[in-house]
Each structure stands twice: as structure tokens, then as C-alpha cells.
Amino acid sequence: MNRIQRTGLFVVIFMIISNLSFAQFSSKNKKATKLFKQAQLVPTQQLDPTTRMPDFKAGLELIDKALKKDPNFWEAYVLRGEYHINLRDKSSAIEDFENALRVSPNHSRTGMTFYRLADLYLDQGSYDKALTNIKSFINHPNANEEYLKSGYSIYDNALFAIDAIKHPKPFNPVNAGPGVNTRYAEYYPTLTVTSKQLMFTRALPFGRDIQEDFFISLKTDTLWGESTPMPENVNTDHNEGAPTISADGRNLIFVACTDETGTYGEQRKGKGSCDLFYTKKIGTRWSNPTNLPGDVNSYHWETQPSLAADGKTLYFIRGLRGKGVDQRNSDIYVSDLNEQGKWGAAERLSDIINTPFAEESVCIHPDGKTIYFASRGHAGMGGSDIFVSQMDNQGNWSKPKNLGYPINTKFDENSLIVSAEGDVAFFASDREGGYGDLDIYYFKLPREFQPTTTYYFDGRVYDKVTNNPVAGHFTLKDIASGETIIISDADAVTGTFTVPLPSNRQYVIEVKYEGYAMTSLGFDLTYNENQTTYHLDIPMNPLNSNTENVLQNIYFDLSSSNLRKESNVELNNLANFLRSKPSIKIELGGHTDTRGKAEDNQKLSADRAKAVYNYLIQVEHIDASRLTFIGYGETNPIISDQEIAKLATEVEREKAHQTNRRTVYKIIAQ
């Protein structure tokens, strides 16, 4: 973790001079001390002609002359080490501080030379030496209290790194290939729930500058196809970066920042230095991006968004601006989408996630409860490490886990995303063997860091009468808790959709659209069918149709009309539909399969229809005049006994009988 950073060069120079101002020098050589004093002042008096920054190189030349006069002048070694740090020559700085200790092991009144060495060795990945020196600093009787807190952080990092290297994680990164990577830098990947569409940022030359734009690659079999740029209304002459794409690939939130003129680009308006923008794909066209509606964007800078698969939760990074604010700190925030389609005021995640140092590149997995993020504040290998945390049922985040070595190294790691299945992770790296600069890689994520596997179902919503596409609105709820898990919409032009399904849950899916009867679906993912995707085309009945609508998520006790509590979500959805259409009247119908006596089936079907009728009146307070009920028994099967008999397995035959056992409603008056 590199804490030796320039936060205003002249302030740093002043601190160096102040810390090395002594009433009496260790050297008795007058020429050496004179050169030393000149070296202290020269960076404040002149600029480097090449960099136009304070001239530390000229200071080094004077220090070298002083050390030739007196090779045991330890203060000169310390000052040379500080100057080498400012010139980012950390190897030379280590040599300087080690020489200072060699010449005078007890020279440091506050132990700061040990601190400097520990920080430098941590940065270089020399963890044993970092640990030795930071122990010397912490145990120093006059240890500089201002640095003790970060000293303990170095200690924790060194201990963790030593242990992590002894227990490496399996890690075999694979380059995503020439369809994605080029000689330019590719980074900040984002993935749809199908794991078949990869969007990322590419840095392209633009005159003397770099231009950041978005590209998309589609997966064909096991290879990523040649990437194509987003349209020009999204990719502009300004920089677009850090995209997050919705689970279905039709909603995009990204970052745009002001240029030197203070503008975000043509037809874009913002609130701070960097804002989040939003665009939606309708058919094959992307809308013109607009500033994200609501209260997420602020005077501060917002960046690196991650849109949850539910479509209504957004995580992002915020850095604060203003007087007295630590510009190196940034934290993870979350915002929820309200019913008006605007994002609410963002809340900072708790201190179990956020630290006094920088948190970056947050990624919420499609399971909705696992985040991956980079941090400089939690114990790690040095620099920025990647961590994982999971939310419990009470909404509390677990203590972050470091993904370990060699996933994390002494260098900066960030920008990790994980596939919906949870077993493959993508990241950007400039490691050897790539196509040039940063490339996107993927690897098998160790099981201990994997999220809940998330499946998906896709298909098309259409008018059952005309076959025209319908832009159905999906609400996915957990049957057990009634919690809304996902909100999504079918494409307004094509009617196609993709909806995530986190595993280990049982779902009610409600599909609505103005002018159509409510349609319901059910998925039980509490058991493993060795199936990760589901395709289902959904016909919707117009309100003026008297066709029955199956309520797939009404459950009764075996051979009984007692409603089970798992039916409550479906019944509540039906009641809300009736409230939204106060003039509608419906008939509730019960059906059985053909097994058992016909008269028993007739009675059971009527009793079950009546149970739903009573629930809507007594619990949901729907006016009884709007409802009727009838039992059809076994008279109207969806699948005939002859068709069932032809099915190959008992499992298939039982599913067919289950299809015939159903509760339905029909609209009989508007």
C-alpha cells in the first residue's frame, strides 16, 4: 500500500526540510553540510527543465557531492531517500535508507526511517523485510504517533501477504483473445447475465490525447467475436468509461467527466466533475444518453457504477471534493430506484466495507447479495487488492475476504466481474504475453469466493390473438418471503426479454401490460435440474378475451382445498391487478387431472376455486360482486390422457398431470 504520495509537492518539500532540520549535524565536514543545506532548498527554488516540476534531480546531485565529502553523513542518505521517493525511484530510496541505518542504526528519533523502509519494501513485495522494519517502528519508544495507524496497517498487510504466498489460490488466467484485445488498452469489462455479451472500455489515440470508448464482443461457442463500437450517440469525442450493463443487455449506465472547458459533451449536462449517465436500447437503437435521473449525481464525483440484476439497485464509487477532504479516499455507495423511475439519495456502505483509504471498481453479482471490489484499506498484498463480501438476510455485509495470492499481487488489481454462473471471473491486466497494454482476461474463480449461481430465462412476450410483440413488465418475487427480486421489461419493439433467476429460491413471476390480463409464471430453483437456462415464450390475453389465464403459483395441500402460504404472493398479485382495473369482473375456475373419481374431482375443483374466491374477499377485500367461481373437475384438460400415455418417463407424465391441475381466472366483464 503506497502511502508515499505527493499531495502537493511544495508541502511535501517543506515537510522533508522540517523533518531534517537539525541544530547539529552528524557530519563535521563543513563542505558536506553546506552542500546538504543547498540540497534541501534547491527543489523549492528551481524547476526541472524537462518536467517543470520541483528539481529533485538537482538536489540529488548536491547530496551526492556531500556524501563524497563524508560517506558517513546519515542525514544526507535520508534526504536522498526522500528525493528518490518523489522521483518514484523506490529501489534507490531503499538503498539510501538502508545506508542511513548502516551508518547510524539509532539515528532516527521517531523511528521514521524504519517506517519508510517498511512501506517501500511492502510496495516492492519484500514482505519479510517490510515486517521486520515495521516492527522496529511500532516498538520504537518515540514512534511518530501520526504514522502509527498506517504502521499497523503495513504490519497487517505484511503478515497477510507472507501467509497468502505460503497458501496460493489456483489461478490460471486466459486472455480473452484478439476479438476483444488489441494493442490498445482494454479494461472495465461488464457482462450480461447470459455471459454471451461482453462490453468494455478501450483507450484509443485521439490526437495527443487518449479517447475512451465502449466496445461490445459477442461470444460464439468458446471464442469472443470481433468487437464493435457502440453507436456515435453513445461514443462521443469526449471520454466514456466504466460501463455497467443490465442483465438483459438493454440498459447501460456509464461515467462521463468534464473536459478542460467544463462540459460533458454535446447535449449532456452534469452536476459535478464526473457524473453517471444512462441510455436504453429499444429494438436495435440506443437512446441518447441522459444524466442519471434522481439524486445519485452530486457536486462530488461519481464513477464505476454496477447495476444489480434486479434493475432497481445501483452500486457506485463516490469521491468527495472540497476543502479539507482527503482526495485519495473514495467509498462505495448504493442507491435504489423508486416507483417514479428515479434513483434515490445514495447511502454509503458500512465501515465493514469502506475504509479511510480508497475503495474502487465495485461489482454486484446477479445473485444480488455478493459484491466484489478493490480496496487499499483492507489487509492485502499491497497496492489495491480485490475482495468479496456477501449480504445476509438482514442486509448486513460480511467481513470482506481477500481473494488471495496470486489473484492479488504487490501491484494494483481491480475491475473484477464474475459471470452469472459464478465460476468464471474477468479482469484487466497488463501482464506479459498480452496483445499490448491492458488486456481483458478470465479465470476459474476458486469455489470459496464464488457467489450463488444465477440462472436466467428468456423468450418473447406476445399478443395471443395477433402474435404482435408486447413490452411486458416483469416482477420477480420470492414465494417464501414475498420480496421483490427483479424488475424488468420486455423490449418495446421485439417483445424479447432476459430475466435473471438466482438459484436456491422458488419464484413467482408476474407479467403485466396495459390492455392485457395479468399473466403469472413459476420457477422452483430449490433443487438442481442440471439446467441453467430456460426459454419460454409468453402469450398475453387481451382484456376483451374470455380465454382462461392460469395462476401457476396457487398451491393447495394434497387432495385438499386448504391454500398453502406459498400462494399468498400470487393471490396478492391478482388482487392488485383487480384494484388497478376496478370495473373488471372475473370468474375463478378450478381444474383437476383425470385420476380419481370424477365426482370427487368435481367437488375438489369447486372447493379450490371457492377457497381462492374467499381469500380475495376476506383477506384482500375485493368486492364479492366482482367475483364468481366454478369447478370444472376433469372435464377440460390441457393435455389429454392419450397424449400423457405416450410420454416416455414417469417424470414427464407427472408434469403433464400437474399441468392439468390448475387454478385459472377469466375476465367476464369490463
Image (tube, rainbow, N blue to C red):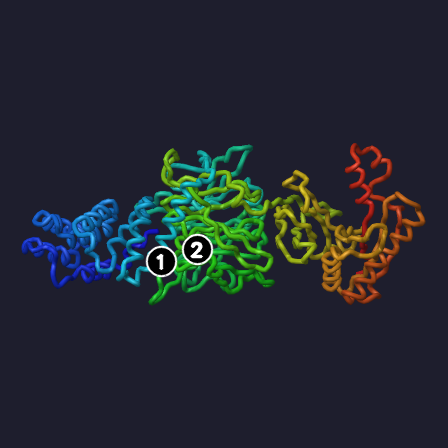
Within 10 angstroms of label 1, few (less than 14), some, or many (20 or more) residues?
some
Residue 265 appearing in the image: no
Image-based side of 158 in relation to 558, left or right: left
Q: Amino acid at mark 2?
A: Thr
Residue 660: % across, % down: 82, 45
Q: Quadrant of the C terminus?
A: bottom right
Residue located farthest toward the left when viewing the structure as drawn: 30
Q: Residue at x 81, y 55 (%)?
A: 666
* Closest to the observer, 355 or 634: 355
Of 581 and 368, the residue lying toward us: 368
Q: Position of residue 31 (x, y in %)?
A: 5, 54
Between residue 282 and residue 298, name the one nearer to us.
298
Q: Nearer the viewer, residue 608 or 337?
A: 608
Give the residue at mark 2: 303
Q: Is residue 177 left or right of residue 146?
A: right
Numbered mark located on residue 304 in the image: none
Which type of secondary structure does the marked residue at label 2 adopt?
Answer: strand
Residue wearing tag 1:
328
Left or right placement of residue 648 versus residue 22 in this view = right
Mark 2 nearby-residue class (10 Å; few <14, some 14–19, many ≥20): many
Query: Residue 220's image quarter?
Result: top right
Q: Which is in the foreground here, disc 2 or disc 1?
A: 1
The tag earlier along the polypeptide, 2 or 1, is 2
Establish if 288 lies above or below 185: below
Counting from the top left corner in percent of width and height, residue 515 is at 72, 56
